[in-house]
Image: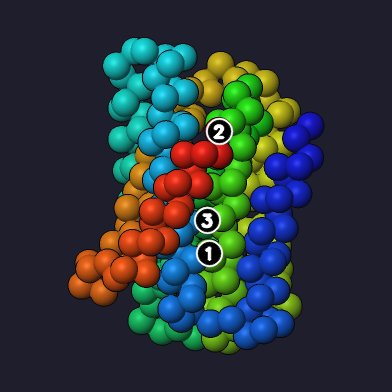
Amino acid sequence: MNYVSIILLFTSVIIGAALVEIIKVKKNNKIRLLLTFSGAYLLSVSVLHLLPVIFTYDSHRYIGIYVLFGFLIQIILDHFSKGIEHGHGHFRNRQIIPFSVVISLCLHAFLEGIPLAGQLHNHAHNALLTGVVLHKLPVAIVLMTLFVQSNIGKKRSYALLLIFATMSPLGVLTGELFTTLVNYQNEIMAIVIGVFLHISTTILFESSTDHKFSLQKILIIITAILISIFSV
């Protein structure tokens, strides 16, 4: 059982929520910079570590269809989650959190966890785990901020957050328990890569005003890429 992955995935969400409650972190420029870093790291991890793995173990050209399918899945999930996966909450009324948002986020988190239970090489597993953890932290901050601004109450906010926090670990457990999923590991990984490609590129462009990158953001992107390159 991959206890380390489960603990890290769960605590990343709890830490994000705690930052909102303890030090009153709000959706500001610092969060945008964190999102930029996570987006650049996700993109780098996908291109440098994950794509080579699926094409090494499955040279069949149709594996690329699963990548595109993952990209499409995230477009659909993004429609219901209102963009929280990439750090935005496009709600007409911020005092009401649509139930579809939580469901979409949970499906997204669950899907990310499944490949972490497979027989990945250590460097690919660690790169994927780090990318997911770095991505979930700012998402948890945005989600908890929206809960605080809404009228759903603290008890319900914490309950929904705990459900979200358990979804990626549940994905890992599902992959561990249902061993037949190992036979489809490449396909599942390809779908997750497609999800990552959508999220990362959207983050990089939406976190920049008028799609222009400041020197600070360019340096952050370069740093994230370099960390990904040397984290083999």
In the picture of the structure, the residue carrying the numbered disc 1 is 139
Colouring chosen for the image of the structure: rainbow
> Which x, y percent locates residue 12?
66, 59
Q: Are marks 3 and 1 in contact (CB under 8 Å)?
A: yes
Residue 126, quarter of the rendered image: top right
Could you say whether the residue bearing mark 3 is in a helix, strand or loop?
helix
Q: Where is residue 230 drawn, in percent x and y?
A: 52, 39
Q: Amino acid at mark 3?
A: His
Mark 1 Cα within 10 Å, few/some/many (few <14, many 20+)? Answer: many
Q: Which residue is mark 3?
A: 135
Q: Position of residue 18 (x, y in %)?
A: 70, 74
Residue shown at the point (47%, 23%) measured from the top left: 53
Identify the mark nearer the N-term, 3 or 2.
3
- CA gap between label 3 and label 2 equals 19 Å
Q: Please, is residue 209 above or below residue 69 in the view? A: below
* Quarter placement of the C terminus: top right
Q: Residues within 10 Å of mark 3 (few under 14, many from 20)?
A: many
Where residue 99 appears, x then y in whole percent?
52, 67
